Amino acid sequence: MRHLTRRHLGASAIGLTTGALMPGPARAVAPSRRHRGSSATATRGMWIASVSNIDWPSAPGLPAEQAKAELAGLFDVAVARGLNTVVLQVRPTADAFWPSPYEPWSQWLTGVQGRDPGWDPLAYAVDEAHARGLRLHGWFNPYRVAFHADPGRLASGHPAREHPEWTVTYGGRLYYNPGLPEVRAFVEDAVTDALDRYPLDGVHFDDYFYPYPVAGEVFDDDAAFAAHGGDFDDRGDWRRHNTDLLVRGMAERVARTRRGAAFGVSPFAVWRNESTDPLGSATRAGVQTYDDLYADVRTWVREGWIDYVVPQVYWNIGFEAADYTTLVRWWSDVACGTGVDLWIGEAVYKVGDPAQPAAWQDPAELSRHLDVCAEHREVSGNIFYSASQVAADPLGAMTRVREDHYRRGH
């Protein structure tokens, strides 16, 4: 979602404009996942972004009762819109929305990284979501440390301050280095702590693995490549291997830690363009998740390493460079026969935005997306970005979705 009011974090309308757009591992046995195919009800979800206070809390440092009321209100919105799943961001920038022994309290919660809010937001979220019959997936960003490049601004005792050798500065921001085994192990430990302590229904990674490309800059992992590159001649292949190791390792930890919990990923929707790879989609995206984020999501799905995939198909039907229908069909073909659940990510934030193509000025556009999904049996749900937009219901588009697709017994 790269859209700043939606996943600069995880989405990614990045590089996509009309016309030209900016520019394998060994087979493994898939973990056995009880949840696969076990739900008779389609997933109807929304993302709740905490980073930069996009959705919740509305501002850092809110009194506990106000923060609780806001979160409960968003859960009520989910129920009112006919949804059954919320994906709550609880580790936005190498920090935590629970009392983690690994990382400091989030600045987006308290206003000061490391400051104890005096309550446990994740415990509250699980209780309130489940009380309403909602499934709750914890959303964790693996490698992003800070939207600045100064380790001295991090909380005292922050792992990135204690281990500066774990970090890379890129594009004016601070990241953990995915090429270091100790970093991957730490990320898995930090995420698993939440799953071990709370009855989460799932663990969710967004589209950020290696960071999105920044023009004129190089992600400096030379030392890590020299130390851990092994027999890899190609830096890109090595980076993809590192991401594979994180995904497979996390999948195994989820399976061992909480029976029935799902592990899924929400990638940028273009794996590769067909012009780059005949296995790719008939798109012209300037970003390709395989080549630019070093995330071979197609392989993860085909090999069954993850339980579900939510490609962020944030473009309208008929968008020339990345057509919604084309991408849903492509992902359906990828997921076919794998047992991996396919849910489609939807860009509610574009509805009614005058800067977007004309299709987004039509209140029926989102509803038509679900019509397209209904034509593909592999699609078993949709997740909407993001909660504040689901609540705002621009042009009445979410009301239209509920009436057309989410009525009781529909």
Image: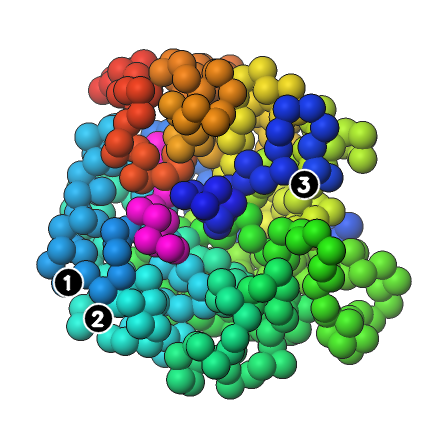
- Residue 275 image-quadrant placement: top right
Residue labelled with disc 1: 64
Residue labelled with disc 2: 117
Q: Is residue 223 left or right of residue 8?
A: right
Q: Position of residue 30 (x, y in %)?
A: 60, 50
Q: CA distance from mark 2 to mark 1?
A: 7 Å
Residue at image coords 40%, 62%: 91
- Residue 176 image-quadrant placement: bottom right
Q: Is residue 228 left or right of residue 201?
A: right
Q: Which mark is residue 287?
A: 3
The magenta-colored residue range is: 43-55
Does residue 57 show up? yes
Q: Is residue 196 left or right of residue 294?
A: left
- Residue 80 image-quadrant placement: top left
Is 51 within the magenta?
A: yes
Is 235 within the magenta?
A: no
